[in-house]
Amino acid sequence: MFTKILIANRGEIACRVIKTARRMGIATVAVYSDADRDALHVEMADEAVHIGPSAAAESYLVAEKIIEACRQTGAQAVHPGYGFLSERASFCEALEEQGIVFIGPKPKAINAMGDKIESKKFASAANVSTVPGYLGVIENAEHAEKIAAEIGYPVMIKASAGGGGKGMRIAWSEAEVRDGFDRARSEAKSSFGDDRVFIEKYVVDPRHIEIQVLADAHGNVVYLGERECSIQRRNQKVAEEAPSPFLDEATRAAMGEQSVALARAVDYQSAGTVEFIVDRDRNFYFLEMNTRLQVEHPVTELITGIDLVEQMIRVAAGEKLSFAQKDIELNGWAVESRIYAEDPYRNFLPSIGRLTRYRPPSEGRAAGNAIVRNDTGVFEGAEISMYYDPMIAKLCTWAPTRAEAVEAMGEALDGFVVDGIEHNVPFLSALMKHPRWREGRLSTGFIAEEYPDGFAPVMPDESQRAALAAIALSASLIEANRRETVPDRLRSASDPLRDDWCVRLGDDYIDVRLLDGLVTMPFEMEMDIAGETLSVVTDWRPGDPVWRGEVGKQSVTAQLRPILNGVRLDWQGLSVKSRVLTPRHAELDRLMPVKLPPDTSKLLLCPMPGLVVSIAVTEGQEVKAGETLAVVEAMKMENVLRAERDLVVGVINAKPGESLAVDAVIMEFA
Ligand code: ADP
Ligand code: ADP
Ligand code: MG
């Protein structure tokens, strides 16, 4: 076994690999760029080597720097994590030349599977069922149109070197092929340095289900069940689970066996994932094989009890797998939520900055029989920079059944405190309550279908309103009680506690009557809320952003934050402003005029900090709804800003090449 390994990655995955290495008694070396000087993976590793400037192309992607770091520290092997150099065969070869072991598959397998066009050819030769399409490079837009017509619409244009859901476009018509082809190619070139694209049939409404395989250097190959990753936004995974609620034993075995056959065909060793799309009739088609550890590997670990990183290290050290296919059992259910620094209320645009508060839920045993696991690379005070993936954490829950695992995930998300940047926790929390998700009726179109206009704060129903009112009022009473018991109190202790209150939630007013008049700690009180009697119990303390307790026997985890004239409550994807008033105060409050937000409908605002790639219109031009106005690049993605209605362009304020702040006015409309 190795005594020292280097982790050629950053963020949560670097931390995750370090944890296992440490448990195995292996010393660890981290590498870091300028932006990551104070990063968690640097702190966790036994040693750390600085490898250059913040831009990944000048640090994490430079093989020579990683090899030099191995030489300096005497690391015997390299774990590449995912992304960066993880699927670069030339990197493995360069390591091998230096006598350093790559903790992953051999260059042959990476070459065969690392490229989408090549891997599809390979898979069909190995009798794996693949998506119908053209197995070659498309030269130009005319060629693309011809091929698309042969396959039949809709089609998908994909970058052969693509990954992470990028460089992929659906086209429903000839015009869309023409338009999408050039954009797919330019995005492929800029994101992957390789502009080869191909075309395959777009399977409508599929599920994404993938098989985890594990192979050693002695010819043993097993599959560790599947993961369902159908909850996607723009072909990028958002939430995953294992097992899939859709597969029966026969389909699981068929997919598993084809995946094992494919792995054998390329002499695969280490952990790898064979991705499929599955249609409504459970026909499955090979998409690609990822020859690395997958982002969502923890859900497989939770249901199999197998540490995939440990297995990768053992296989790389030449050990035989210590179990066979018959030893692998799938136990219970696991769900993963990817927590990203992105604003769910603004079309999930990246949000960067400092985590002024970061308090994940505690890991380990949770309510019921659930288990919480949180893989992260950040800490309170850390910065989410523009240089890398905006992932904050991967929150996983495990429980004996899917319903319990989902319930535990909702609870864990509701207690996950992140301040300082925008993040998608409210969206994920709302997802956990979504009836269609709960029923497991999924497809890769789920988010687009269920949130066609984007995500907006959910409206509370009757019982949620009662719970929110109870939370707001209990917090207000606990705070008042605290004020009374400190010296120099603001009110006299002899004031009787009034029993009638009105809680304003958004624009609603909810009458609450307290059925006893004493505030005790922990807080326990019967309340009459809009005519219903509920007991409210909590040990919440002033200043804590998380309110945990019970409202009418229902256990509740919610968050509250002071805002001007009140408190903002976040729970189950709801985000509501609340204010506790006396009945008289409420009466007056209802008479206050409503302040209207400023009219921005005549402006095109830059939705995120970014670089103007192009302006597609000129002053005075008439534009139809849906037409492109400008393209802004942020986080290595080209974002097309389109007209939301028919309009006439007025003054244009921005030029291509210009860097803009969020909300900068790109153009005005007449
Ligand atoms: P990446 O390398 O970016 O992960 P994949 O080929 O794995 O690319 O595809 C990512 C996602 O895009 C899939 O999970 C699926 O939702 C969607 N997708 C890809 N190819 C097709 C297709 N032919 N038909 C329908 N959806 C597809
Ligand atoms: P997976 O295929 O593992 O389920 P995704 O397809 O969503 O996960 O994203 C993984 C891909 O996204 C990687 O192959 C890489 O291209 C990119 N990526 C994600 N996280 C990182 C990271 N921390 N550093 C570099 N690239 C990353
Ligand atoms: Mg994929």
Image (spheres, rainbow, N blue to C red):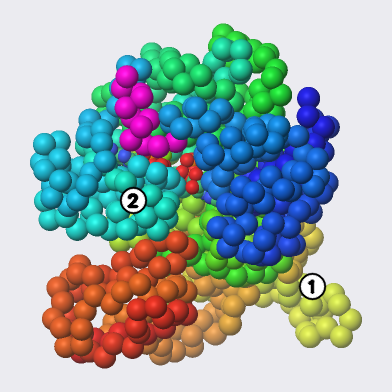
On-image quarter of the C terminus:
bottom left
Residue 398 circle label: none
Give the image location of residue 90, x and y in percent: 54, 39
Tell whether label 2 touches label 1 (CB within 8 Å).
no
Gap between marks 1 and 2 measured at Cα: 64 Å
Q: Is residue 592 left or right of residue 29?
A: left
In the image, is 450 to the left or to the right of 379? left
Q: Secondary structure at mark 2?
A: loop
Question: Foreground: 618 or 306?
Answer: 618
Q: Residue farthest to the front? A: 97
Q: Quadrant of residue 517?
A: bottom right
Q: Which residue is mark 2?
A: 195
Identify the secondary structure beneath mark 1.
Answer: helix
Q: Which residues are magenta?
A: 114-125
Q: Where is residue 344 shown, x and y percent of the image?
A: 45, 62
Which circle's residue, 1 or 2, is located before the other in the chain? Answer: 2
Residue at 38% across, 27% down: 246
Q: Is residue 539 above or below residue 437?
A: below
Is 312 left, or right, of 19 in this rendering? left
Q: Position of residue 121 (x, y in %)?
A: 32, 27
Q: Which residue is mark 1?
A: 482
> Residue drawn at (49%, 27%), measured in percent from left and top?
109
Within the magenta stretch, is there residue 115?
yes
Prevalent SS, magenta region: helix
**Residue at 46% of width from left, 53% of height from top?**
430
Residue 6, relative to residue 525: is it above or below? above
Inspect this view and state whether residue 290 appears. yes
Q: Nearer the viewer, mark 1 or mark 2?
A: 2
The answer to whether one can see residue 406 in this image is: no
Amino acid type assigned to the residue bearing label 1 in the image: Arg
